[in-house]
Image (tube, rainbow, N blue to C red):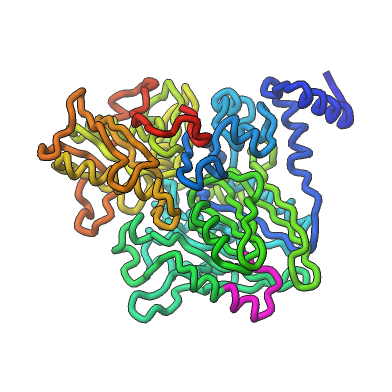
Amino acid sequence: MSMNRREFMQLLAVAAAGGMSLHSNFARAEKAAESLYDLPPFGNVSLLHMTDCHAQLLPIHFREPNVNLGVGSMRGNAPHIVGEGFLKHFGIRPGSLEAHAFTYLDFVEAAKTYGKVGGFAHLATLVKKTKASRPGALLLDGGDTWQGSGTALWTNAQDMVDACKLLGVDVMTLHWESSYGAERVKEIEEKDFAGKIDIVAQNVKTTDFEDPVFKPYVIKNINGVPVAIVGQAFPYTPIANPRWQTPDWSFGIRDEDMQQAVDAARSEGAQVVVVLSHNGMDVDLKMASRVTGIDAIFGGHTHDGMPAPTIVDNASGRTLVTNAGSNGKFLGVMDFDVRDGKVADFRYKLLPIFSNLLPADPEMAAFIDKTRAPFLEKLTEKLAVTEGLLYRRGNFNGSWDQLIVDALIAEKDAEIAFSPGFRWGTSLLPGDTITMEHLLDQTAITYPWTTLTEMSGEMIKTILEDVADNLFNPDPYYQQGGDMVRVGGLQYTCDPSAAMGKRIDNMMLKGKPIEAGKTYKVAGWAPVSEEAKDSGPAIWDVVANYLRAQKVISQRALNLPTLKGMDGNPGVAI
């Protein structure tokens, strides 16, 4: 059946009114993309935003979480809404392209229909298209860009540095970038990025004299309007990542310093002030209520793809808080109408990047092919086939994480295994071949060593309690990043709303209670202490050995805690 554009739009209207899903017809989805990426310009200042791509140069699958719990005042508010509640909250039609991009619903079926997302060649096409309709627009990179793939690790981040220059990034801030070490980060800033990309981070200072390590902000002129971009690197970098990688840098949230930076930018004539943040969305929301004079916060770290900004009132006005997802899935577009020296109005759109619906940019595609060529033999090694969906995202566990802890227990002859609550890592569909590249998507870090430790039951509980407080502390300024540590072998109960030290209970191993004074063999990886360097084989080698032996990875049940007090919480759908 053929139809013209008018007939197709009429069909879309009828389908939407009747609740019809368009999953079954990709050709119609292709037509829908024409309107998806047709974004009329607005105002006179435009800022494009990407974040947390985690070095994914190629299109990938990435499943959004079905558990993103909010506690206290955060319960029931964005970003702590999942599934059908998310669609209702943001007015997204079930079964649509956007429903697949923003939620886990019908993930496997929709992924097969709509294909992969992201990829720098397709992102480049969208960036060029959007900039062409918005003269002077800047591209902001929220960080977690140089880490997350085998090629980024093996090139010491050079592949992503060159890709971002080619993409046209103008300003960026940092988190995982620091895990390459302070010397490497400064080398890139002073050589590769000189005169091209500004690194901004008002909250990173030297440990001796509190001197700024990076520019706190830059002011760019967009169509005659001075626009300040203030940087906010991840404030808990030396806790979430090894301190020895940035020994002479101090971090922190630094509200007072942020206020000083905003005021200084205003005093220099900035008519628009935005923050390029890697705080995480809950921290950004609190900061927006405390620091005045910020027009918008472009957030990252928590990988929350938010279709609309949250508007936060503060003492002198309001601040728009956005978060642009992860893994190259989205491009945020903020248009400001600036009049009489201030923002009068705005439009915002978070555009999902469907690689089947956007042509690849030839120049970027050629660069990616050339960059990957020396590593293809290692990247494409076939390790096993997965019978079930493999994903990593959610507060407590994902099937990729389950596979990692299962491998640790088997290969290290352990009773219990811990795996970090990382949010990055691509998804694989049932029947896909697991390659070394896919494994590295889950494990490629600069401190990959595995460990085997004898721990007392008391110590195990202390670790779980500490991580739970980092995740569920009712004050977001005390949340130090990441999701709950993934646990293999051990079952437990978790009450996220309980007081510190009282969230974890009923710890069991093979049907028997964990004893506080008894020792257990616990495997893990990604140790942050300098003493743990080279403590054991790299995690990818351990898991690769397991996969090669298994050959076929069966669908496995997730080892999830029993939750207390979370009935009716819109951030959970288990």
Residue found at the far top of this picture: 1
Residue 545 in the image, given as x and y percentages of width and height = 28, 33
* Front position in the image: 255 or 234: 255
| Residue visible at 45% across and 38% down in the picture | 393
Q: Is residue 348 visible?
A: yes
| Magenta-drawn stretch contains 391 | no
| Residue visible at 57% across and 25% down in the picture | 106
Give residue 108's quadrant in the image. Answer: top right
Residue 201 in the image, given as x and y percentages of width and height = 50, 68
In this picture, is 361 found above or below 233?
above
Query: What quarter of the picture does the N terminus occupy?
Result: top right
In this picture, is 470 found above or below 46?
above
Residue 243 in the image, given as x and y percentages of width and height = 31, 62
Give residue 10's quadrant in the image. Answer: top right
Q: How many labels does the image show?
A: 0
| Magenta-drawn stretch contains 267 | yes
Q: Is residue 377 visible?
A: no
| Residue visible at 76% across and 33% down in the picture | 32
| Residue visible at 25% across and 30% down in the picture | 489
Judged left or right of residue 334, residue 216 is left
Residue 103 in the image, given as x and y percentages of width and height = 57, 34
Give residue 11's quadrant in the image. Answer: top right
* Front position in the image: 204 or 2: 204
* Front position in the image: 147 or 70: 70
Magenta segment range? 262-274
Judged left or right of residue 7, residue 214 is left
In this picture, is 114 found above or below 43?
above
Judged left or right of residue 281, residue 461 is left
